Image (cartoon, grey):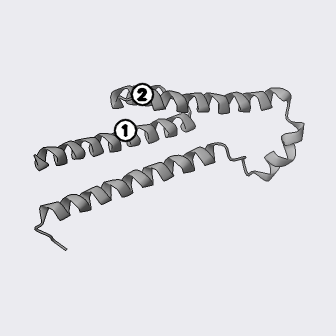
């Protein structure tokens, strides 16, 4: 439905932004849970006991590197910087984390701009 009431439009847009933000957070949580989920191949499960110790260490190092990257991404507040990291990233999981961080930053920028617009319009 179309509404002519500007205040109602603002509330609707705010509600939409909030839903988008919640969806982004759910996506990040899903991504984090998938990242630490064990692999599902039966043959790999059977062979896990026979893997060399170095293979286990490699996987642990990769998980630690992804956790470190995740912490670093939280500190970055520039989409341009994240885009550079994305272009330099080699592994799929790294790119996935960086893209999620970019989406989160953009959503925050949109929300901040909208709040600033709401404050400006209320004056």
Q: Camera-side residue: 100 or 87?
A: 100
Q: Tell me what residue is drawn at x 40 percent, y 42 percent.
A: 104
SS at circle 1: helix
Task: Provide residue 42's location: percent of width, then percent of height.
Answer: 80, 52
Q: Camera-side residue: 70 or 116?
A: 116
Asked if residue 90 shows in the view, the reply is no
CA–CA distance in space, label 1 to label 2: 9 Å
Query: Seen from this angle, which residue lies furthest bottom?
Result: 1
Q: Tell me what residue is drawn at x 55 percent, y 37 percent.
A: 92
Question: Where is 31 relative to 102, above or below?
Answer: below
Residue wearing tag 1: 105
12 sits left or right of 75 in the view: left
Q: How many marks?
A: 2
Query: Seen from this angle, which residue lies furthest right?
Result: 50
Q: Tell me what residue is drawn at x 31 percent, y 59 percent.
A: 15
Residue wearing tag 2: 76
Q: Are marks 1 and 2 in contact (CB under 8 Å)?
A: yes
Task: Provide residue 115's location: percent of width, then percent of height.
Answer: 23, 45
The tag earlier along the polypeptide, 1 or 2, is 2
34 sits left or right of 113 in the view: right
SS at circle 2: loop
Label 1 crowd bin: few (<14), some (14–19), many (20+), radius 10 Å: some
Quadrant where the N terminus sits is bottom left
């Amino acid at each position: 439905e179309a509404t002519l009431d500007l205040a109602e439009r603002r509330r609707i847009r705010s509600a939409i932004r909030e839903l988008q933000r919640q969806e982004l957070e759910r996506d990040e949580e899903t991504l984090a849970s998938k990242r630490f989920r064990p692999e599902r191949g039966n043959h790999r499960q059977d062979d896990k006991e026979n893997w060399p110790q170095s293979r286990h260490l490699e996987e642990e190092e990769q998980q630690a590197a992804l956790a470190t990257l995740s912490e670093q991404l939280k500190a970055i507040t520039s989409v341009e910087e994240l885009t550079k990291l994305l272009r330099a990233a080699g592994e799929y999981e790294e790119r996935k984390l960086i893209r999620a961080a970019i989406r989160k930053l953009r959503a925050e920028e949109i929300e901040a701009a909208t709040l600033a617009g709401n404050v400006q319009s209320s004056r």
